[in-house]
Image (cartoon, rainbow, N blue to C red):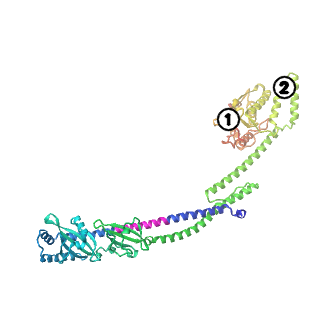
Amino acid sequence: MRSSFQPLNTLRNQIFIGFILVMLIMMSVAGAFIYLNVSHLLKNSAERHIGQTAVQASGRLDALIGQMDSLTEQVANHPSVQHILLEERSGGKVSFRQRQSLLQVMHSYQAYMPSVGSLELYTAEGEMLFPIREGRLEDRIGKAGIREANEMKGRLVWIGIDPEDPQSLLAIRQVSLVDRWFSRGGYLITRMERSYFGLNDASAVKEEAGETMLLVDRQGQLLSGEPVNQTDLSAVLHSKTQTVHIGEREYVKAVQQSERTGWSLLILIPVSVATDGITVLRTTLIISASLGAVLFLLMSFMLSTLITKPIEHLIQAMRRSREGALALNPEPAAAVELRELNAEYNTMIVDINELIRVICEKEVLQSQTELKALQAQINPHFLFNTLDAFNWSLQERGEDELAGLMVSMSRLFRYVIEPAHHDAWVTLGEEMAQVRRYLELMKMRLGERLSWQIHMPQEAAPIPLPKLLIQPILENAILHGVENRIGNGHVEIRVTPSARPGWIQIAVIDDGPGMTLEELAAVRAVLTGGSACQSKGTGMGLANVQRRLALYYNSAPDATDGLLVQSAVQEGTVVAFEIPDEYGGR
């Protein structure tokens, strides 16, 4: 089963499937988050709207109550009312004519506010004065209403539904006698139609939006508004949740209580109406998610192709490199990272080709060096045997100095023509020993004309360097410096720390005739161009040394500067170079 799906396990398919899964997770989480939050926002918006409507309606209710309070206060303070109640309170008898005179007063106020059904005036003992009929206040509103009116001391008290007329509401206030130190003189009852508090139209509540506005007294009885499924609304008023169930419908409620009456203004709106926008939101989210999914699939396929296609081309180039074709991959990539990857691959191919070329040149140069060392066409074994025979013969004759010269010459030849399989690297101490042997031979040839010195710190002896790197420079110093000088000449080899940390400088100094500026420029041009500048004796030129320095040390952390030549007429010549003080360029 696993092997059958193996061809499908490609980077493109992995990216494609990964993008799809990420898209599904992100869109699901985002859709749920948006849906829940927007639903919550819509519900909160409906609640805020209902609350604002309740505040506005409460203001309207307070204004209506204030109008009624002002009207009843004017009636209570009317001179005719005050005079009749004061006379009755003083023990006098109110005549029928006086009671009849109240008719005009009451009708004038009723005409001012048509919603007032009737005004009733009672004495302090509860006997009815107006209208002109028998009746008692206690029978009209009960003792509780009278007690509350007395406690309010002249302020309007709202009783609620009229027991005699369910379509009317009652309010009572105590009439205080101004001329008798505002003592209780009687009671004024106001009966008004329920339509007086018809707040739906006044607060611009839209019936088509499903909003319902109810005025409820302290006992939960409906005072104004369209009746709902349950008439006792006390449970709805005292519910601690923002949503309530009335019948089979769920409503969002807002309650605003009037401080003057103790009544509550209850506003209800069906939850389905408040969250009507959620259905539209759900549909919009589904359509948007579908379109987004299609677009995301297309973009995922394009993006996966954009990523994997350059990688496939790079893999093909690597396969060709494995077969031996180290060629660059010219395929451009749109992404910065893929361009960098392709550029790094091309750089690696260039470096590998350069390394192969350098290794080949090193091998060729080493072979050329060994061949030039053997240009005398002398069999090494025959040469060493002959030199040993000379050494023993000279020792038998007592020629110790010449015998030592034969030993130095034998060691010199052995060092130069050592077999190719031996390491081409030696220590600086070994190279200096070879230099000493060469100078001893040159001293034998030139006699007093040549003097020499070697300055090398003992700690510099283990430093590795390529074999025969100093001797060609020394040959040039003797050939062009000492031999071209009139009189005795001096050669000095000096090893000192370089100004560059971790490097040492090796300088060969002669006091020969030096070079003019033109000759010095020509030598530097030869070193820069890399052509052979042959020196007599070994056939090894300065350009050869320059090339070997570049081959061995250009791969070091800091590339070598090669040979540095300084010279002036009659001041001699200095040829120097720098190498790392450990591990060399290997």
Secondary element at image label 1 = strand
Which of 402 and 323 lies nearest the eye of the viewer? 323
For the stretch drawn in magenta, what is the main secondary structure? helix
Q: Residue at the left extreme? A: 92
Q: Which of marks 2 and 1 is nearer the N terminus?
A: 2
Cα gap from disc 2 to disc 1, whole angstroms? 36 Å
Q: In which quarter of the image is the C terminus?
A: top right
In this figure, which residue is indicated by the disc labeled 2?
A: 403
Q: Total label count?
A: 2
Q: Seen in the image, is 203 located left or right of residue 376?
A: left
Residue 19 position, x and y percent, is 60, 62
53 left or right, relative to 130: right
Q: How crowded is mark 2: few (under 14 residues within 10 Å), some or many (20 or more)?
A: many
**Closer-to-camera residue (242/3):** 242
Quadrant of the snapshot with the N terminus? bottom right
Crowding around mark 1 (Cα neighbors within 10 Å: few <14, some 14 to 19, many 20+) is many
Q: Can residue 437 be seen in this view?
A: yes
Is the C-beta separation of discs 2 and 1 under 8 Å? no
Q: Mark 1 points at which residue?
A: 504
Question: For the residues carrying marks 2 and 1, which lies nearer the camera in this image?
Answer: 1
The stretch drawn in magenta includes residue 494: no
* Depth check, front residue: 316 or 274: 274
Residue 93 occupies quadrant: bottom left
Point out the stretch of residues depicted in magenta: 35-54
